[in-house]
Image (cartoon, rainbow, N blue to C red):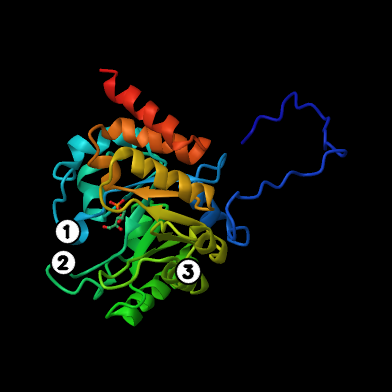
Amino acid sequence: MADTDGNIDSHDYYLDTPQTDTPLPLKGCNSLDWGMKNRLANIFDPKTGRTVMLAVDHGYFMGPTTGLERIDVTINPLLQYANTLMCTRGILRSTIPPTFNKGVVLRASGGPSILKEISDERIAVDMEDALRLNVAAVAVQVFIGGEFETTSVHNMTRLVDAGNRYGMPVLGVTAVGKQMARDAKYMRLATRMCAELGCTYVKTYYVEKDFDTVAAACPVPIVIAGGKKQPEIDALTMAYNAIQQGAAGVDMGRNIFQSDAPAAMIQAVSRVVHEDMVPKEAFEYYETLKNAK
Ligand code: R5P
């Protein structure tokens, strides 16, 4: 019990100062409960409302992808530069130091490998385990237009229900089948469906034409996947264009961990995302860091 001896009987209620109520700088998120918002603040930098998610979950259906053969060697040194790590629970428990104290977005769907029809996923993590791992969000793949579209949407809505029960955000990850057109019309459909059906935020791909309409039509934050490895200047340009057209960040994997200089690349991406650094400058920054050895 607090010692009350010598307690000073004077109080200042700051009667002229209205109570401050700090909103979360994320669109569509201010009706969420405190725990959900607190988790989101561990994914999105509260100062910018944006995030650099480092995606290393590829092994859940692709096995040891180039650059991810030894996550302890190649990825752990990059953690300091990311806002958030996206990975599977297997990698989290086996390889990521428990001292990592930023948000983790946990891959929560899976099933088929690249050898099979990949849209035939199921929920692959129990919400109880996600809570045990103290993660900031769970991620579920949604295959709009895919062979198992309804199953994947149902996976998502079940995770949304479980997430709402415990204050766990759900990231809907839009997956585009090889045979589908990767255009704004498709992305508007897929992202809007994820948001309407309850996802807290949505991951999509950047499209060259009309990405701003994709971002505008999605009532919750959108982040873009990096996609296959491109030259660094092109990946920085894509990130810049997405941010300028309304994305709240990137969830980037191969364009970081398959770069010639992953640490330099993630720092350059971070400046594009959080400081609106233009691609040319960001590329020069990347080159400077890369050569400073
Ligand atoms: C697919 O395996 C995952 O959803 C990745 O997290 C996502 O595709 C982002 O990684 P990348 O930037 O390599 O496309």
- Give the left or right position of residue 48, taking residue 179 as reference: right
Q: In which quadrant will I find the C terminus?
A: top left
- Residue type at the position of mark 1: Met
Q: CA distance from mark 3 to mark 2?
A: 27 Å
Would residue 135 be visible to someone looking at this image? yes
Q: Residue at x 53, y 65 (%)?
A: 218
Q: CA distance from mark 1 to mark 2?
A: 6 Å
The count of marks equals 3
Q: Residue at x 29, y 44 (%)?
A: 255
Q: Which residue is mark 3?
A: 188
In this view, 88 is above or below 153: above
Q: Secondary structure at mark 1?
A: helix
Earlier-in-chain disc, 3 versus 1 = 1
Q: Nearer the viewer, residue 51 or 159?
A: 51
- The image quarter containing residue 256 is top left
Residue 221 at what x, y percent from top left? 52, 57
Looking at this view, name the residue that lies furthest to the front.
Answer: 209
Tell me whether the residue at label 3 lies in contact with that at label 1, contact meaning CB atoms closer than 8 angstroms.
Answer: no
Q: Nearer the viewer, residue 44 or 254?
A: 254
Q: Secondary structure at mark 3?
A: helix
- Residue type at the position of mark 3: Arg
Tell me whether the residue at label 1 lies in contact with that at label 2, contact meaning CB atoms closer than 8 angstroms.
Answer: yes
Q: Which residue is mark 1?
A: 62
Residue 176 at what x, y percent from top left? 32, 68
How many residues crowd around disc 2 within 10 Å: few (fewer than 14), some, or many (20 or more)?
A: some
- Residue type at the position of mark 2: Ser
Earlier-in-chain disc, 3 versus 2 = 2
